[in-house]
Amino acid sequence: MPFRLDEQAFIDLMARYVSRSGPRPVVGIGDDAAVLALPRRSHALVTTDFLTDGVHFLADRTPGVLLGRKALAVNLSDIAAMGGAPHSCVVSIGLPRDTPPGYARDIARGLAGMARRHGVAVVGGDTCAARRIFVNVALVGVVERGRAVLRSGARVGDGLYVTGRLGASAAGLALLLRQGGGPRRGRAAARREGIDPRQVHAAARAAAIRAHQDPVPRTVFGRALGLSGLATAMIDLSDGLAQDLPRLCQASRKGALLLAAALPVDPAAVAVLGPERAFHAAVAGGEDYELLFTARLRHETLLARLALRLRLAVARIGQIRPVREGIRIVGRDGRYRPLPRGDFEHFR
């Protein structure tokens, strides 16, 4: 029977896709509220993120499957940053009345696939008609009592570390924006972003766009940091170093010193934007969804072993300093500069 887009049909479709994902709820989809059985001697972690067409993604350039995956991935990254394990979620989605049924089905399919991969039970949600597509996920995670990694635990002398590489997501967004204005406007946007389409290799373009549309939450590494107690403070890089590092420092009442030469700039960002703009994207671009964390320097060997075992690059990019020193970055020329401002704020 062909899928017809309406409220109950989407709920039924979601229920069918997620029937075997994650821990089995006491009561799941079908009642006014879900009933969950959480592990004993654990605390619940609760997070939510909103993705809106035109603000967080471009619907006409984003496959539905990837939108569904990203909607859950950005929440998984929050749970990872607390050192917890994801458990269950509810999903709310708004769709314009003219949304192709196949696109709605792909969103559900992508979200359900990400839920299965990370052992998350989708236990409910809501749907409505909307002027623009939006997807909101509220995710419940669990963490052992006393094991949650907060932003407030950084200490003077701690190393400042980041997983993976930075800047590719911002480069991917620049490419997607360039695709939307037609040939002439596209070329003008490309020049403003420092992009020469003729010189950007197809593989670099694909890697940058994939980084923006299909981020990989560091759930296993974040969980390992929580269980091991190696991380003293942690935050996920949803808004970029320029905004998220000050949040960690403010919560810990500390300053920080960043080393420009140590920042792991993604090669795809360099290929798309050039070295200078790629470095700026790594600092201020956002949406990399890597983990920024602090740890005692004496534990660096243990961190290196953990990263090697989990096959994840981890770089020390600076150190926590007294609050009176503020947050500064040391350039390759040895000069100290204040941390630049982030590229995007919702209400600026």
Image (cartoon, rainbow, N blue to C red):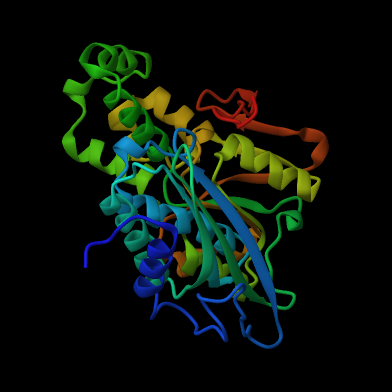
Q: Is residue 277 above or below residue 204?
A: above
Nearer to us in this view, 142 or 29: 29
Q: Is residue 77 above or below residue 117?
A: above
For the image, the number of numbered tags is 0
In-image side of 101 versus 173 (left or right) = left
Place of residue 256 in the rendered image (x, y in percent of width and height, measured from the top left):
69, 40
Left or right relative to 187: residue 88: right
Q: Residue at x 41, y 42 (%)?
A: 96
Residue 25 in sight in this render = yes
Q: Position of residue 113 (x, y in %)?
A: 34, 67
Looking at the rendering, in which quadrant would you find the C terminus? top right
Residue 271 spot, x, y in % from top left: 28, 31
Horizontal side of 253 relative to 157 (left or right) equals: right
Residue 76 lies, with reference to residue 51, above or below; the image says below
Q: Is residue 7 above or below residue 60?
A: below
**Residue drawn 64% across the image and 75% down it:** 143
Q: Quadrant of the N terminus?
A: bottom left
Could you tell me which residue is drawn at 32 percent across and 42 percent down? 62
The residue closer to the viewer here, 311 or 55, is 55
Camera sees residue 91: no
- The residue closer to the viewer here, 156 or 81, is 81
Q: Is residue 335 left or right of residue 214?
A: right
User: At which x and y percent is residue 244?
Assistant: 63, 42
At horizontal 37% and vertical 19% (from top left) the residue drawn is: 193
Q: Nearer the viewer, residue 279 or 9?
A: 9
